[in-house]
Image (cartoon, helix red, strand yellow):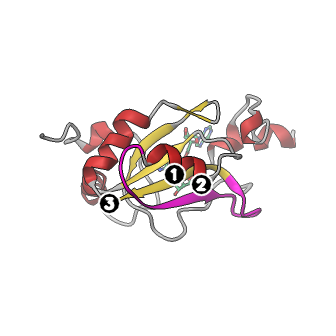
């Protein structure tokens, strides 16, 4: 069956500012990659839970948990690497928006894992979005870091 995901502009709204290449190379990577990014995870979700859910889409090569660069503890995202493109597309199609640890997770195509990408890029060590959040989210450390500093 022909792939439903032919146009990279439509398959991911995220642009990694640290991707070392042209826009065209970035888009090609998204279309061919066998890596997905999982967002909106609880800090308490384990690699075993991720494995259990994402192996429903196909055989997993590797899971890389996203970590706070200061505390080295999970900070609410991860990368799942599959062997096949079909399984990667199935993960985005069928698992995105499903509930893991009481939270709707977001599954996004990713250009590919390289060393260093497992660390949160926010000033406080976690993810950028957790710097600016103004809501109280007990699964992600309470209030956003800027609100906590006020
Ligand atoms: N494939 O959606 C994604 C994605 N995200 C959000 C992060 N990564 C992603 N990969 C894919 N799809 O390896 C990857 C990164 C990195 C790791 C940690 O996860 O490539 P990060 O989340 O700490 O930092 O990354 P990143 O990616 O640099 O964050 P970005 O794009 O600036 O902002 C993320 C969110 O924060 C967005 O929702 C944005 O709207 C919000 N945000 C950013 N700046 C502000 C601001 N000034 N005010 C309010 N909100 C802000």
How far apart are the two marked residues, 3 and 2, measured between alpha carbons?
A: 18 Å
Q: Is mark 2 within 8 Å of ligand 1?
A: no
Left-right relation of 33 to 50 = left
Mark 3 and mark 2 residues within 8 Å of each other at the beta carbon: no
- Name the quarter where the C terminus is drawn: top right
Q: Is residue 126 visible?
A: no
Q: Position of residue 28 (x, y in %)?
A: 24, 56
Dot 1, how many residues are within 10 Å of its Cα: few (below 14), some (14-19), or many (20+)?
some
Q: Read off the residue under disc 3.
A: 83
From what the image shows, is residue 26 above or below residue 12? Answer: below
Question: Which residue in the protein does label 1 denote?
Answer: 51
Magenta residues, as a range? 56-74
Q: In the image, residue 97 lies at what x, y percent? A: 48, 30
Contact (CB < 8 A) between labels 3 and 1? Answer: no
Q: Quadrant of residue 57?
A: top left
Proximity of marks 1 and 2: CB atoms separated by less than 8 Å: yes
Q: Which residue is mark 2?
A: 47
What residue is rendered at 39% in x and 61% in y?
A: 112
Residue 105 horizontal/vertical position (percent): 53, 36
Position in image of residue 125 (x %, y %): 71, 57
């Amino acid at each position: 069956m022909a792939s439903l995901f032919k146009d990279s502009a439509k398959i991911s709204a995220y642009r990694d500012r640290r991707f070392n290449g042209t826009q065209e190379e970035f888009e090609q990577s998204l279309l061919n990659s066998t890596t997905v990014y999982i967002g909106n995870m609880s800090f308490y979700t384990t690699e075993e839970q991720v494995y259990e859910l994402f192996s429903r889409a196909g055989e997993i090569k590797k899971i890389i948990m996203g970590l706070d660069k200061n505390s080295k503890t999970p900070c609410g995202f991860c990368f799942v690497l599959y062997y096949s493109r079909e399984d990667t597309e199935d993960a985005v199609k069928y698992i995105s928006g499903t509930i893991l640890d009481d939270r709707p997770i977001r599954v996004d195509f990713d250009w590919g894992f390289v060393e260093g990408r497992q660390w949160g890029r926010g000033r406080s060590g976690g993810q950028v979005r957790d710097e600016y959040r103004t809501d109280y989210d007990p699964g992600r450390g309470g209030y956003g870091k800027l609100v906590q500093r006020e």
